[in-house]
Amino acid sequence: MKKCSKCKEEKDSSLFRKDKRNKDGFQSHCVECQKQYNNNWKNSSSYFTHHWYQGQKTKTELDSFVIEEATELKKLREKTTKIKWEVDHIIPIHHPLCCGLHNAFNIQVVPTVWNSKKGNRNMNTLFPTN
Ligand SMILES: [Zn+2]
């Protein structure tokens, strides 16, 4: 018999996982408590992901501000460079591999020609260095 360090119940050694690092060769808590622990961890991480995602979906004041600023910047750049610019998402909003976010941290102002070259987001092709 072994006492579980978590639920404090005396249980048969077979209800404890083997752990060589421990003196008696078993984990200090029982299998049930280990399960509980794993579940809690899973729940809390999905809880976190869920709320993080929910939070990202709604635009904050900062997001609106940055988007407004970016729009102003776009107009300004169009005036000075005489080419079309647009407010773009650094990470595309709809992409099979990732999901970009319409918020302050995913906004950039890029030339329209740059955007029309699909998948080609290398600054060097637009402004060659050599
Ligand atoms: Zn236990």
Image (cartoon, grey):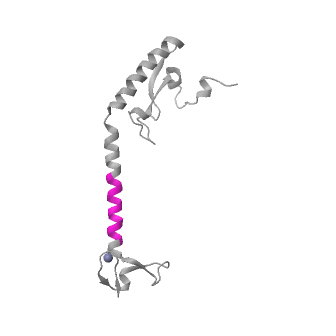
The quarter of the picture showing ligand 1: bottom left
Residue at horizontal 30 percent and vertical 79 percent from the top: 8
Residue 104 at x, y percent in the picture: 40, 32
Residue 26 in view: yes
Magenta region, main secondary structure: helix
Q: Residue at the spot x=33%, y=73% of the render?
A: 33
Q: Which residues are magenta?
A: 34-47
Q: Is residue 44 magenta?
A: yes
Number of numbered labels in the structure image? 0
- Front residue of 24/130: it is 24
Please, is residue 128 above or below residue 32 in the view?
above
Q: Is 23 in front, or is 25?
A: 23
| Quarter of the image where the N terminus is located | bottom left
Q: Nearer the viewer, residue 85 or 62?
A: 62
Indicate the quadrant containing the C terminus: top left, top right, bottom left or bottom right.
top right
> Could one spot residue 82 in this view of the protein?
no
Q: Quadrant of residue 73?
A: top left
Residue at image point 38% right, 33% down: 103
User: In the displayed structure, does residue 70 sit left or right of residue 119?
Assistant: left
Q: Is residue 108 above or below residue 42?
A: above
Q: Position of residue 38 (x, y in %)?
A: 36, 65
